Amino acid sequence: MTRADAIARARDDFKSGAFLAELDRRVAYKTESQNASRGPELRAYLEQEMVPAFAALDFTSRIVESPSGKSPFLFAEHQESASLPTVLIYGHGDVVDGMEGEWREGRDPWRTTTSGIRLYGRGTADNKGQHSINMAALRAVREARGGKLGFNAKFIVEMGEEIGSPDLGKVCDLNRDALKADLFMASDGPRLSADRPTLFLGCRGGIRIHLDVVLRDGGHHSGNWGGVLANPATILANAISTLVDGHGRLQLEALKPPRLTNQIRSYLADVQVVPTEDEPALAENWGEDGLSAAERLYAWNTLEVLAMSSGNIEKPANAIPGHANAVLQLRFVVGTKVDGLIEAVRAHLVAKGFPMVEVRAAQSFAASRTDFDSPWIKWAADSVRETTGKAPAVLPNFGGSLPNDVFSEVLGLPTIWVPHSYPGCSQHAPNEHILLPLTEEALTVMAGLFWDLGELPRPLT
């Protein structure tokens, strides 16, 4: 059998409907990790769905309990030879709220529904569809090689990614030996665009910054007190403008990343951010001057106002409010000095005349990425190009956030993500979906990657 045979098997799995039936069965598990009552469903997905699926691939599986008693994990392993390369693969079986009743045409989020080239269902894009693609590709390669993969494979499935992967780092740290590998390769998030295969090497970090201005209890009549009472909403709006201006440009040096290197610019030189018809158009004159859209999204920091509140927007009273609040989020790339960031923001606001603004942090996660010099990057890009005939976009990091730091920092692995969704997939919203042509191509991409991994006599160094 050959590489072409493995890819043909992956494509046949799609065309026969077998893969889509498998995904429909997995979507039916209501694995909402943000819903405290879904504990039995989370465990059932691993025990009833994943364990038998891995057994069929000749993997041995075990359930690993969370140290905090939260959602369990599944470890699966296929060992062929200690001299062969070992890949660690990751997926998460939990999803966000199903949002029943909010889907177009009354669609059931817990069943897959085809409409044109779209396959709807909660988890189709994030992440059941993506780790199912990778498992199906492993199956195609194993069948093409007569029951062998040609490499060693380990798989970890978690059930708490949508609540921030609270125990993933600790579980991986406690199981370093069991998870030892030469390469981490997984799939989550969107491609750069639906028609361009993409590799990303890590993710941006994030930190939420809460700003609160509390001047007094209750509101006071704006006619009787306007002009003599300080307005907390006015103060807060002006304080924020000293951090990020009206065109989205960072105003405080402590919020900015290191200067872009020529190496990063070269990777992003041919990356175009072009929204499709159903995605929002890019804003003109927004973001850091002198950067391309790709550099702003994948290599720079952004400070976004996520929410603001003062008074009652639904029923505004003729009164000066007593307090105002805002939640901002800094998305940051590797190299940003986040230690002491809150103190720097606080000192900046005091220096600008806003000592009354209280500053605190919440919900932070780390930035991480693989070293650009890793030989695995070229290996993966060459494989994808051979399968698709397209040069993949190689991004320094995903624009959003994933628990990549657990694998790159805790386990010390080179990390490569091969996403199988696209930016307009509506993940985390009603009408989540995958594109059928993209899914078919993704199956072939992963079959090619896994075949090529089995052709390596030893790990790349």
Image (tube, rainbow, N blue to C red):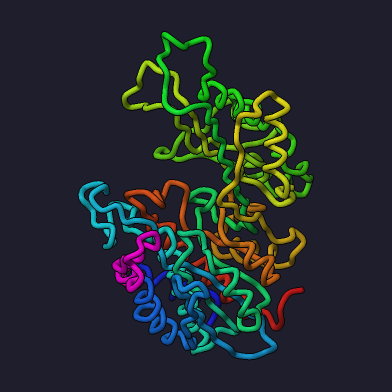
Dividing the picture into quadrants, the one containing residue 405 is bottom right
Give the x, y percent position of residue 106. 20, 50
Is residue 269 in the magenta section? no
Residue occupying the point 39% across, 39% down: 278
Give the x, y percent position of residue 156. 52, 75
Residue occupying the point 55% across, 51% down: 363
Is residue 35 in the magenta section? yes
Q: Is residue 413 left or right of residue 147?
A: right
Q: Is residue 184 left or right of residue 69?
A: right
The answer to whether residue 452 shows anywhere in this view is no
Q: Is residue 64 left or right of residue 47?
A: right
The answer to whether residue 165 shows anywhere in this view is yes
Give the x, y percent position of residue 178. 61, 83
Residue 281 position (above or below residue 409): above
Give the x, y percent position of residue 304. 56, 37
* Quarter of the image where the C terminus is located: bottom right
Residue 128 position (above or below residue 320): below
Total count of labels: 0
Residue 189 position (above or below residue 71): above
Residue occupying the point 67% across, 85% down: 84
Q: Main secondary structure of the magenta part?
A: helix
Point out the stretch of residues depicted in magenta: 17-41
Check the image and name the residue furthest to the front.
Answer: 217
Check the image and name the residue furthest to the left.
Answer: 106
